[in-house]
Image (cartoon, helix red, strand yellow):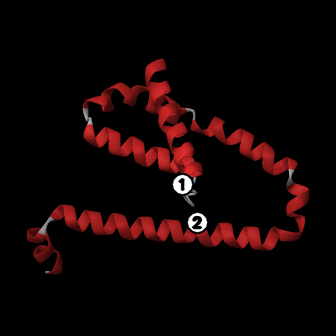
Amino acid sequence: MLAALATLLVFQCLGEGLSYLFHIPVPGPVVGMLLLLAYLGLRPASVAALEATALELLRHLSLLFVPAGVGIMVSASALRGDVVPVVLSVAISTTLAITVTALVMRAMLRRQRGPSDKAGERA
């Protein structure tokens, strides 16, 4: 488990470093995740080594939001004048994310069914 956790942290650090070094307008952890995805695509055998640790981290993902929630509560006074724009942006971005996810899922399901199922769908 320690080796898998170290691997995940190395990719996060690589992402942070590349994002900082090349001034990429994408957060470092996202770059690290893309690097990890590429690595796992090139070495599928590594998936099994990381899977148990990744699933364990996902089981406790809600705990990782506690520091962010505390940070928001601490800086709530700074947001007092901007409550309406913040609430609107969260509502709009959430709606947009759900819509895009639904459209992509619908397209992927159609693609997975194949052309033979589409003809039966119209009837």
Q: Is residue 2 above or below residue 111?
A: above
Can you give x and y, in whole percent of width and height, for residue 101 in the image?
Answer: 43, 64
Q: Are marks 2 and 1 in contact (CB under 8 Å)?
A: no
For this orientation, the residue located farthest to the front is: 21
Mark 2 is on which residue type? Answer: Thr
Instruction: Report whether residue 1 is seen.
Output: no
Give above or below for 91 relative to 18: below
**Which residue lies at the image location 65% right of the left edge and 69% below the top edge?**
91
Q: Residues within 10 Å of mark 1 (few under 14, many from 20)?
A: few
Quarter of the image where the N terminus is located? top left
Q: Residue 66, percent across and down?
A: 71, 39
Which residue sits at x=86%, y=55%? 76
Q: Quadrant of the C terminus?
A: bottom left
Residue 121 in the figure: left or right of residue 87: left
Place of residue 26 in the rendered image (x, y in percent of width and height, measured from the top left): 55, 57
Q: Which mark is residue 94?
A: 2
In the visual, does 54 lie left or right of 24? left
Q: Locate residue 120, reporting x and y percent.
A: 11, 74
